[in-house]
Structure formats: C-alpha cells, structure tokens
Amino acid sequence: MLIKLKYYGMEFSIDINIDDTSTKSKKSIDITRVNAAKMIRQFIKQKYPKQFKSWVKSESYSGGSSINVNLCNFDGTPIDEVIFNEIETFSKSLKAGWFNGMIDSYEYNESSKSDIGTLINMYTKFVFVSNEALWGSKEYRIKEQAEA
C-alpha cells in the first residue's frame, strides 16, 4: 500500500505492508531499509533537484542491514559541506540505533514520530554517508583524471 508520510518537514511516498492481524493498540509505521533508502532519495530530489550526483544503496545481511549514500558534484569533487551535513543528518535519522563499543552491543533508538504524531519504527542498523563519488563511477574517473 502506497502512503504519504510527513517526516522532517517533508512529504514522502513509501510502500508499507499493513498487518490486519496485528493486535497492537497503537498505530505505527515500520520503515525498512528499502523505504529508508527511498526516503533519502526523495529528500535529495526534493531539496536539491539535479544539483549534484547521488547514489543510495541498501543492503541486507545476516544480523542487520545498511544504507550507503555517496554524494559528489558532476566533476567528482565533494559537494558543499552545509548541504552534505544536512543530507547526512536526515539520512542518519532513519537508522534504528547505534553500536555501543563499550558494551559490544547494538542499542536501539526509541520510535520516532512523523510530523503528525504517528509512531515510526526504524529498522536499518547502519547508515553511511560519504562526500565522494562512488568508486568506479564516471564521476570517480573524472576526478581521478583531473588529479593525475
């Protein structure tokens, strides 16, 4: 089911599975790694249409999932630091928690809330954001040639 979700002051279109057999008394939305990646793509497209190149890829593996975001100008150079920080902050707001090395354990965040108060459960364990071209991309090769 396609829904519109207001989060972070913006509207996002995401597909969610509704479990009608659920006995939960509170309404909530589960944001999987796939939906989180879609939200990051939509955030970039809405805020900065065609201003730079971006790649957003999600992975699932035993023990969790992750999203990798790469950003760069069309010539392979890093994007403006202010824009990068905004995208990184938004992207990391979609992760489930953080790894606590002191106790060697992953600690989960409490549920977030949408702009209208709906509980949102995040399920992506790790989000990595890099201000550089994706290795092997056209932009990566352009930057390498310029530095040579």
Image (cartoon, rainbow, N blue to C red):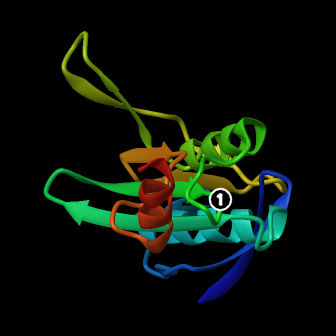
Residue that sits furthest to the front in the current view: 148
Provide the secondary structure element on which disc 1 rests: loop
State how many labels appear. 1
Determine if residue 54 is in view.
yes
Q: Looking at the picture, tell me which residue is in the foreground, 8 or 71.
A: 71
The residue under the point 49% across, 34% down is 109
How dense is the environment of label 1, judged by Cα within 10 Å: few (below 14), some, or many (20 and up)? some
Picture layout, residue 66 above or below residue 49: above
| Residue 97 image point, x, y percent | 43, 36
Instruction: Give amino acid for label 1.
Output: Asn
Determine if residue 23 is in view.
no
The residue under the point 35% across, 60% down is 135
| Residue 83 image point, x, y percent | 75, 45
Picture layout, residue 118 above or below residue 126: below
Quarter of the image that includes the N terminus? bottom right
The residue wearing badge 1 is 73
| Residue 136 image point, x, y percent | 33, 67
The image quarter containing residue 57 is bottom left
Q: Looking at the picture, tell me which residue is in the foreground, 114 or 130.
A: 130
Q: Looking at the picture, tell me which residue is in the foreground, 42 or 54.
A: 54
The residue under the point 65% across, 59% down is 73
Picture layout, residue 56 above or below residue 109: below
Residue that sits furthest to the top in the current view: 102
